[in-house]
Amino acid sequence: MHTPSLSSATGQPPQKGSLILGDHLLTGVSLPAMVLHQKVIEHNIAWMQHFADHHHAHLAPHGKTTMMPALFSRQIEAGAWGITLATAPQCAAAFAHGVKRLLMANQLIGQANMALVAQMIEDGLDFYCTVDHADNVRALNDFFAARGQQLQVLIELGVADGRCGVRDGEALSALVEVIRQAPALRLAGIEGYEGMIGGDSALEDVRAYGARLVETVRHLHDSGVLATPAPIVTASGSKWFDLIAEAFDQAELREHYTPVLRPGCYVAHDHRLYREAMEAVSERRPELEGTLEPALEVFAQVQSLPEPGLAIVAMGKRDISCDPDLPMALRLYRDGALVREVSGWQVVHIMDQHTFLRVPEEADIQIEDVIAFGASHPCLTFDKWRQGLWVDDDLAVTAVEPTFF
Amino acid sequence: MHTPSLSSATGQPPQKGSLILGDHLLTGVSLPAMVLHQKVIEHNIAWMQHFADHHHAHLAPHGKTTMMPALFSRQIEAGAWGITLATAPQCAAAFAHGVKRLLMANQLIGQANMALVAQMIEDGLDFYCTVDHADNVRALNDFFAARGQQLQVLIELGVADGRCGVRDGEALSALVEVIRQAPALRLAGIEGYEGMIGGDSALEDVRAYGARLVETVRHLHDSGVLATPAPIVTASGSKWFDLIAEAFDQAELREHYTPVLRPGCYVAHDHRLYREAMEAVSERRPELEGTLEPALEVFAQVQSLPEPGLAIVAMGKRDISCDPDLPMALRLYRDGALVREVSGWQVVHIMDQHTFLRVPEEADIQIEDVIAFGASHPCLTFDKWRQGLWVDDDLAVTAVEPTFF
């Protein structure tokens, strides 16, 4: 039995989701808490690594989903080539926890962020970021040249109506020319993100985009403008990773290039958005063995039963993703034990600290009951927490792992 | 000039929004950053304290908005009676930073959370929480009686179709009876939250609810069931604080009761939701001098200009509220100086780490330009940050203050 303490070993007050009265999730923890089912995490990490290996691609899981270095370590131990991130502070958090190769799939903007990266490169980080504009290329060159450093960059290839990235061959050629005049920059390959593609012809468009990335990196390689012996070609979120993997799975690429897949959400998976995406992958690729499983849940307690058929749960927008879907009630626990799986209990509204759950008027639900909730979009659940609880099959907490958002 | 460091004094990697190359927001900070304009914060704190004083009410600002103890200290120094919070871990964070009176305007659920509160009461905290259900009353009584402690509680009075709280006089009487049989509980008054009220007759309904709260606390006081000499009656979010203040502003209340207002968002205010609420207050109360001002902004940089009329800003859902409104571009800075206020630049989409800003095709906008953004609902911006930068009128950073979400 733990003694509750108002300051942890770090001298800080206990956070939400902390162990207070023991290490069992249902009896010892200040709920709500973010929970990771350890076996499922391990399964998902192994599944995606196997998928990448099978397609002769490297894996650089997008770490911005979780920002949990304990997961980065597991992903790298399982065979990941590196970790992908979105910002310089995210890279600093990963590097401080031992990750030695980082692909920042984003532009590096601003002198303070450049300084963060410069320090890490000096300290031994193998770092890549993307460029898509001559002004950024010149600013990076000025900054890193002044320090006598070199910066590895990938040109981001965008799609029309998309996010960042050069849109066409003309812009690409012009940017290559600017990079050639930037001696502090080493052009290491091509980066893209197919997740911006949508609409009726999405599948064909994603495949065409994958082919365009391959064709572009080949063209640059043949032109002699790439500064690395095995140029990088990289794309893939967690929705169409199979299509990008197929586009990259070519003998020439595996021999002379470095194809890199970057899914992030797969490690936690989810209960709707990526579940449905995975179902679509399995339909396209019926020969794939197994599937990703949802590993992430938020456990919370019923705090009020003010009207028949309405339960107010002590969990809010600050604890779980409500975008693009409201949370989903999965299972009910009472007195430290599972009562049953629930279905038809519907979250109808969520506020900062409260969730409104519609239940049948005759439902067996009580104050202090614990409910496990699933959600869509793991990125927007992880970032609500400074730590997550890893649990075993009996809901004993096996680790309390910090996040770095 | 600071030397960039990958670990701060705490041994942690630098967070987003940290000072890296100096203490000027535009040249030294890793953007994006959450920014609090110090003078405006001080103005808002003084304005609301004066408002409460003028209405003979105590102020217990809702701290869940900011979870920034540096703000709690300022609010208490300015005259606040205590701080309101929503959860036991939030209370632990405030108590660890010196707040001695906390009103948890929520039910206290679960043994781990009760243990947190019990420890704080033992350590000298003046603590109040709400109850609305017999089962919770019995659980609290069992827990605190076993420790030989007493717990001060307020009955939460709800509204039909609202959130927590007893809905009618019958439920109220039944709950009072259960509390009378709970020797570890001291019934200290009545709590309500008018923010759930909406619709066409909202103004009348809020006024009626304020009157009902007053009438109820009087009734309980007269019945002799309250265990405190100056019973508490408390309500008020940041939208209709004037109406609740008016309902509480009675000679009898100020002499024999403890009326407490609990607005939270006022300290940072915002650029739409609460700005409009304040405009409505000023219309209802034209004699009020001055107004609340928006103090909270997020500064971020242009990272890509991929198509005419489209800027991608390095800021996302993880950095600023996008609920109920998308962020609003306010001002443009370049090379460390203000260029101009902007209008008509419209955020059209936001992703986890990127904001899509539509600008006129002929707009003067460049890579690395810094844009100050405002937002609706300060609660959902504060909780995206582990620290906020307090700045003076020249955008020099005067303090880096941690949050405890």
Image (cartoon, coloured by chain):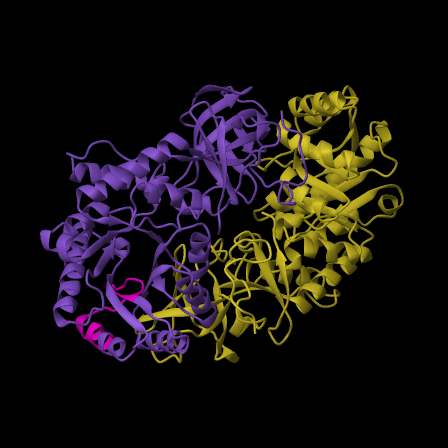
Chain colours: A purple, B yellow
**What residue lies at 22% left-to-right and 65% top-to-bottom?**
A228
Viewer-nearest residue: A315 or A136: A136
Q: Is residue A242 left or right of residue B275?
A: left
Residue B121 in the image: above or below residue A1: below
In front here: B55 or A218? A218
Q: Residue B305: x, y in percent?
A: 33, 72
Look at the image and tell me in which quarter the N terminus of chain A lies: top right
Residue A150 lies, in percent from the top left, at 34, 70
Residue B373 pos. (x, y %): 50, 66
Q: In this image, B331 relative to B137: left or right?
A: left
Question: Which residue: 31% across, 62% down?
Answer: A163
- Looking at the picture, tell me which residue is in the foreground, A241 or B375: A241
The range drawn in magenta is A153-175
Query: Does the magenta run of residues contain A168?
Result: yes
The quarter holding residue A369 reads top right
Q: Is residue B177 above or below residue A255?
A: above
Q: Answer whether residue B216 is visible to the viewer in this image.
A: no
Residue B180 can be seen, yes or no = yes
Residue farthest to the left, as pictured: A251
Residue B17 % position (x, y): 52, 62
Instruction: Please give the count of numbered marks on the rendered protein.
Output: 0
